[in-house]
Image: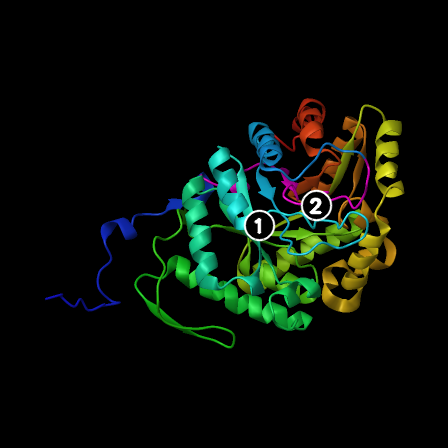
Amino acid sequence: MTETLEYNPTAPRPVEETAPLVDRNTTNPMFNDQKMKLGLFGINCSYGLIMSHAPSTYEVTWKHTVSIAQKADRLGFEALVPVARWKGFGGTTNFNGNCFETYTWAAGLAQATEQIGIFATSHLPTIHPIVAAKAATTIDHISGGRFGLNLVMGWVTPEMEMFGGAQRQHDERYAFGQEWIDYVNRLWTEPGSFSFHGKYFDGDNVESYPKPHSAPRPAMINAGNSKSGMDFSARNVDFNFASLDTLENIAAYTSTLVDKAKAEYQRTISPMTYGLVVCRDTEKEAKADFQRVIDEGDWGAAGNVIKMAGSGASQSFDHAVKQFQERFIAGWGGYPIVGTPEQCAEEFVKLNNAGMNGMIMGMVDYNEEIDYFGESLLPLLKDAGLRH
């Protein structure tokens, strides 16, 4: 006769399920004391951050990805942040259309690296909180506490339509995102089982074990720069990535964001930025290579991005859509740094003085240029007091 075992959700958990967590400040380099944190952005997607046919050895293969990641790891970079992409942007490159999925990408790189922080970029409408929480926990354990989540609300309508649902309006996407992260935070931290009943999610006798390796939870990023995006970041995440045009606007933005987090949510948040770095021996070479990216740009793909971003889909890009279209070609709308190592170091200092505590970078040729970055620019950042 088979014994029937009753499930008791309030029963004590086995010891191995409730093992002590480790302070993430000791495991994730994103919480170190470097004045200017460094990372790479977009090394999981075709063409990286450039919508261009400019020559490059960069390719979306696992061998190439691991090579780039391990070089960044050896240089002491803090972060590898992927782009979550389900559909390319057309044009002659089908920009970012060839793209590794980011949770599994992060798991692989967590095993292949030793010190660098590894992020998954997650479009929240495409993955249930229970699945996301479990995947994130798994990668956090693989990495020994170096994992983090980059939270994206899902602004590209053709991608969201691939999943069979209607695109939500801008502010409702953040309301959905708030419920999503509230659910995930409970899964990461709440002992035993619980019920969750919200506008978008329902679950009874929900639990998730093991808990993450990191305490109180893995690191989190958001790149929302609209009013709703800033509020979401100030309330929830550790790092906000901003796409801004001038140092004056950057200084105003960073102070507003930091003050908002402190005053309204009694939290600290670290502003960071992203952009294309083109560093060469001479200013002439650097400007020529940057201009080549633009001259050989895929304006069809850029036009598709600009059309979607300018339609109100992503208010974070409104300023860039109107005035800085070339920045989408050369750096996905980010802040460009172009020049000699000395000139680039000076730009990093200016960004830091404006309140930016780090930068995740695109490069025309990641695998080749990161070596030059380490040899020529990194020592100057140390001399400037941005790194040690």
Quadrant (top left/top right/bottom left/bottom right) for the N terminus: bottom left
Where is residue 370 shown, x and y percent of the image? 68, 29
Residue 237 is left or right of residue 158, and the answer is left
Dominant SS of magenta comes to loop
The circle on residue 274 is 2
- Residue 139 position within the rendered picture, expressed as x and y whole percent measured from the top left: 45, 46
Q: Is residue 34 above or below residue 214?
A: above
Task: Give the tally of numbered discs.
Answer: 2
Q: Percent position (x, y) of residue 78?
A: 57, 38
197 relative position to 285: left or right:
left
Q: Residue 217: tell me if it is visible.
A: no
**Mark 2 belongs to which amino acid?**
Tyr
> Where are the magenta residues, as a range?
27-54
In the image, residue 29 lies in the stretch drawn in magenta: yes
- The residue wearing badge 1 is 101
Name the one closer to the observer, 301 or 144. Answer: 301
Residue at horizontal 48 percent and vertical 58 percent from the top: 132
Q: Is residue 133 above or below residue 286?
A: below
Quadrant of image for the C terminus: top right
The residues tagged by marks 1 and 2 sit, at their Cα atoms, a distance apart of 21 Å
Q: Which residue sits at x=81%, y=43%?
A: 52
**Residue 326 — which label?**
none
- In the rendered view, would you say 21 is above or below 184? above
Task: Tell me the crowding category of disc 1: few under 14, some 14 to 19, or many 20 or more residues within 10 angstroms, Cα based.
Answer: some
**Which secondary structure lies at badge 1?**
loop
Q: What residue is at 60 percent from the left and 66 percent from the top?
A: 163
